[in-house]
Amino acid sequence: MLKIRMMGTKSDIEWFQKLMKNHLQIRVLEISDLYANKGTDKNYRCYMEIIKKNTRKTTEQ
């Protein structure tokens, strides 16, 4: 399992979350709420837990 900390604008974080959710080799386990970064009103942080999907395919000849 990987734990990822994302920092950026709300739209950048939402874009990356969608990207990860739709990735064929990744399963998103959990996404935290957005937290405002201290000292700025445009940057936020968010946390995500992911694992690698089992995408191994068997081939028959």
Image (cartoon, helix red, strand yellow):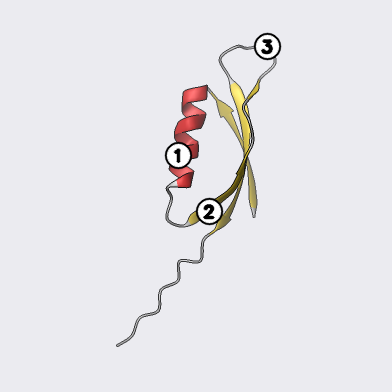
Q: Which amino acid does label 2 sit on?
A: Arg
Dot 1 falls on a residue whose secondary structure is helix
Specify which label sits upstream in the sequence, 3 or 1: 1
Tell which residue pokes out farthest to the left in this image.
Answer: 61
The image's mark for residue 27 is 2
- Residue at image coords 63%, 31%: 33
| Position of 32 relative to 28 (above/below) | above
The crowd level at tag 3 (other Cα within 10 Å; few <14, some 14-19, many 20+) is few
Q: Mark 3 points at which residue?
A: 39
Determine crowd level at label 1: few under 14, some 14-19, many 20+ residues with C-alpha closer than 10 A. few
- The disc placed on residue 18 is 1
Q: Residues within 10 Å of mark 2 (few under 14, many from 20)?
A: some
Depth-wise, is mark 3 or mark 2 nearer the camera?
2
Residue 57, given in percent of the width and then of the height, sits at 41, 74
- Seen at 43% across and 50% down, the residue is 23
How far separated are the C-alphas under marks 3 and 1? 27 Å
Q: In which quarter of the image is the C terminus?
A: bottom left
Q: In the structure shown, which secondary structural element does the residue marked by tag 3 occupy?
A: loop
Is 39 drawn above or below residue 36 in the view shown? above
**CA–CA distance between discs 1 and 2?**
12 Å
Q: Which of marks 1 and 2 is nearer the N terminus?
A: 1
Cα distance in 3D space between marks 3 and 2? 33 Å
